[in-house]
Image: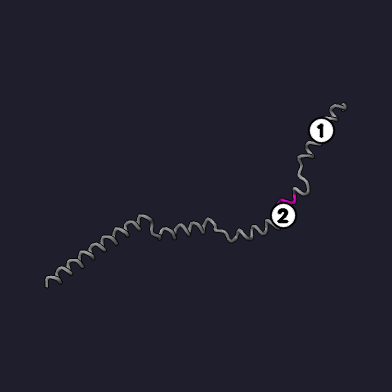
Amino acid sequence: MSEEMFRIMMEEIKDIKANMATKDDLKGFATKDDIKEIREEMKNFATKDDIKDIREEMKNFATKDDIKHLDAKIDMVAKELYDSLHTLLEVMDKK
């Protein structure tokens, strides 16, 4: 092996070492125990089945349109009640 090739290889090895993770770098990674704890905590999260159940239950809630229709019905009943009371008062005044 020529001296030039050896020098190039040594530079490559230095570059590789410079880019490798150190022990301190590896301390930041999750350990098996960390992953076990995370898995335990994840048992409390909603599953796809839980979300399906929630979506089904939500179908029973009133929508914005339902509330608009209800508001309109309440307004109509209130007006009818007001008109009826007004008519009743007129009748009572005449007596």
Of badges 2 and 1, the one in the foreground is: 1
Q: Residue at x 44, y 60 (%)?
A: 57
Badge 1 crowding class, 10 Å Cα cut-off, few under 14, some 14 to 19, many 20 or more, is few
Name the quadrant of the C terminus: bottom left
Range of magenta residues: 26-32
- Coordinates of residue 40 in the picture (x, y in percent): 64, 60
Q: Measure how far apart labels 2 and 1 are at the Cα level.
A: 33 Å
Q: Is residue 47 above or below residue 21?
A: below
In the rendered image, the residue lying farthest to the front is 93
Q: Amino acid at mark 1?
A: Glu
Could you tell which of marks 2 and 1 lies nearer the N-terminus? 1
* Quarter of the figure with residue 84: bottom left
Give the residue number, with chain letter if any, for mark 2.
31
Label number found at residue 11: 1
Q: Residue at x 76, y 40 (%)?
A: 19
Q: Amino acid at mark 2?
A: Thr
- Coordinates of residue 50 in the picture (x, y in percent): 51, 59
Name the quadrant of the N terminus: top right
